[in-house]
Image: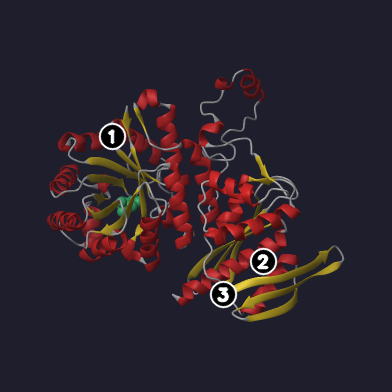
Amino acid sequence: MRTIKIFDTTLRDGEQSPGASMNVNEKVQVAKQLARLGVDIIEAGFAISSQGDFDAIKKIGDEVEGPVICSLARAKEEDIKRAWEALKDAPKKRIHTFHSTSDIHLKYQFRVSREEALKRSVGMVKLAKSFVEDVEFSPMDATRTDLPYLIEVVEAVVDAGALTVNIPDTVGYTTPTEFGEMIKAIKERIGDRAVIAVHCHNDLGLAVANSLSAILNGAGQVECTINGIGERAGNCSMEEIVMNLRTRSDFYNAGTNINTKEIIRTSRLITRITGIPVQPNKAIVGANAFAHESGIHQDGLLKEKMTYEIIRPEDIGLQQTELVLGKHSGRHAFKARLKELGYDLSPEQTEIAFEKFKHLADQKKNIFDEDIETLVSEEVSKMPETYSLVDLSVSSGTNVKPTAALKLKIGDNVIDRMEHGDGPVDAVYRAISAITETKSSLIKFEVKGITGGTDALGEVVVYLEEDGRNARGHGSDTDIIVASAKAYINALNKLAAKKSR
Ligand code: KIV
Ligand code: ZN
């Protein structure tokens, strides 16, 4: 059975989803989880595109063990040098360089000839190769490229030293049969001289089907993202490709190195960090993926799971949510649970998370893994704060004018303010806005319960916009009004950090 390499591009192409931008600490947190999931390669960013991407690639290279860490680079000297700067200290590293090859791109966007595109591609693969052995090349918009020319480019970059050639379906245009034939033709020409990768977009909903067809025709690496997030309609979804190969290994005769039990945690982490929800009926990780409504199905399942279940929920890490800790659990039990959940926190972070846990345990009887993950995730992705919440009290009800009294710390000063509003959240937001004198506008406000029950930890996500800059803020608390305040302050802190850059 062949092992297909999983190249995760959640932190690069996935981050190109509208509203999905992540800060450096969030990216490191995601990369650590991807390492636990067992991906082979992490595309950690596009080093030249921003200082944030550069820093994230560097930090991931320094801190994340296991996968190869990769940076994207256009086929330009300055891009490749920047990618190398970000990657050079990583123990396992790859430069992924690309150049368009379709006539549509060459003629209208880049205004260069096919000969020039080929020359640049070969030249930049050679340059990348002078820094690092592991070089990948992508002929962008490959599926709308003249096939003989595409094969010529692929062969030339392999001769120049590319160990992986990635065939992107950049605009999600191809079909499974057509793409399979393309991969077969490339495989016939280059044989085992390089790994053939595929990178499919989902514009026509075929990203996974196209990738599977490529695997059947010789592809050895699939580029994908968690929950299928990415540019426009997204990329090939990691959980779908992996579970297809696992469930139908009899058909594909191929598997992956993925520890599938980590799939659901990874999916939830991405939702929490990016704020992009998973549709309930999404394959594998949707909330309804294992929910059986029909009486006939339920009857069958009770008699024998195999009747209507082709994947066991536990195979993707979906257990009956376990009660893990409670009010009387001590520091030791908390630390042990953090370790089991795969978190590696500094002593200071552990202490802060433990204090938060104790506070939560006073308010909430049963503490579940999801609660701990929410607390810890907040702690590890925290950035320096301009504003912090000191105190909040709110009154509201059927016959009371909603009022919020709030204290915020800004630098060494604590400023307080009382405001009325249309509801308690509105009153709190007016008070925060008055103290911070923010010019931002609130674009979106979402509330959800992390676990069931009226004492559940509630999570609020807000989106702000100011002068073309966007920021997403999270806050969690058993009190939904406090969670709302934390989310707003978190987003304002992110906007402040962006301004000071
Ligand atoms: O979709 C695409 O073509 C890409 C390349 C940079 C590989 O993301
Ligand atoms: Zn892409």
- The location of residue 143, given as percent across then percent down, is 27, 45
Say what amino acid the circle numbered 3 marks: Thr
Residue under circle 1? 180
Which residue is rendered at x = 75% and y = 54% of the image? 362
For the residue labelled by badge 1, is the local secondary structure a helix, a strand or a loop?
helix
Q: Is residue 335 visible?
A: yes
Q: Mark 1 or mark 3: which comes first in sequence?
A: 1
- The location of residue 180, given as percent across then percent down, is 28, 34
Which residue is rendered at x = 41% and y = 38% of the image? 258
Mark sitting on residue 386: 3
Label 2 lies in ligand 2 vicinity (Cβ under 8 Å) = no
Instruction: Give the CA distance from mark 1 to mark 2.
Output: 52 Å
Q: Is residue 399 left or right of residue 494?
A: right
The quadrant holding residue 214 is top left
Q: Nearer the viewer, mark 1 or mark 3?
A: 3
Query: Residue placed farthest to the right in the image?
Result: 399
Mark sitting on residue 371: none
Q: Mark 1 or mark 2: which comes first in sequence?
A: 1
Quarter the C terminus occupies: bottom left
Q: Mark 3 or mark 2: which comes first in sequence?
A: 3
Instruction: Give the CA distance from mark 1 to mark 3.
Output: 53 Å
Mark sitting on residue 485: 2
Say what amino acid the circle numbered 1 marks: Gly
Say what amino acid the circle numbered 2 marks: Ala
Which residue is rendered at x = 19% and y = 36% of the image? 192
Label 1 lies in ligand 1 vicinity (Cβ under 8 Å) = no
